[in-house]
Amino acid sequence: MKVGISGHQELGAPAVKNWVRSQMEDELRRTIFDVGISSLADGADQMFAEVILSLGKLLEIVIPCRGYESAFAHPEAARRFRKLRLRAVKSHMLDYSRPSEEAFYQAGRYIVDDCELMFFVWNGKPAQGRGGTADIVDYARRVGREFVWINPIKAKLSNDRHT
């Protein structure tokens, strides 16, 4: 079985990132799968790829466009992208000449179509631009794709209860 990811790039404070990673690891450990697929965007997508590899599973990637690396706002995210890309067993390049909302949307759709189970790291809010996580959740629902929803807002609520 193949699992895919779509998630927010900005996850917030380190405690939220740690909570999301922990939820992801727990869910993936309970799931029987061989391959994870990601577009390696900053944030949840790269985290998912790292967890997939740490579990000894195979990583496939979808590159939304030529020049994709120029879309990374942070040099560290671009470095992680290059490192993870080298560890992928398979790479799919979409036919877009440059980064765009449409390229990102189509990459998300490709991932949904190519897997049996999606993981969404999503705050439940509408997308801020075409191709955002909410758009991919909507597409997955329309095609009947099963998914796991990890809501980073729950991390803050959980942390607030412990303070």
Image (cartoon, rainbow, N blue to C red):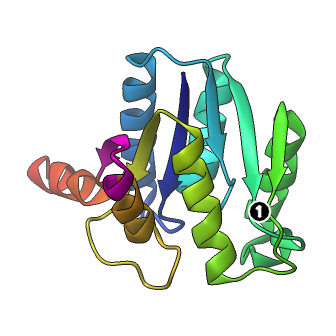
Percent x, y of residue 30: 37, 17
Residue name at image x 81 percent, y 75 percent? 96
Q: Is residue 71 magenta?
A: no
Percent x, y of residue 122: 35, 60
Give the mark count. Answer: 1
Residue name at image x 16 percent, y 56 percent? 157
Which residue bears the numbered disc 1?
76
**Quarter holding the N terminus?**
top right
Segment tinted magenta in the rendering: 141-150
Question: Residue 136: which quarter of the image?
Answer: bottom left
Residue 15 appears in the picture as rendered: no
Q: Residue furthest front?
A: 143
Q: In this view, does 118 lie to the left or right of 9?
A: left
Percent x, y of residue 86: 90, 40
Q: Looking at the picture, tell me which residue is in the foreground, 130 or 128.
A: 130
Q: Identify residue type, mark 1.
A: Glu
- Characterize the local packing of mark 1: few (<14), some (14-19) or many (20 or more) Cα atoms within 10 angstroms: few
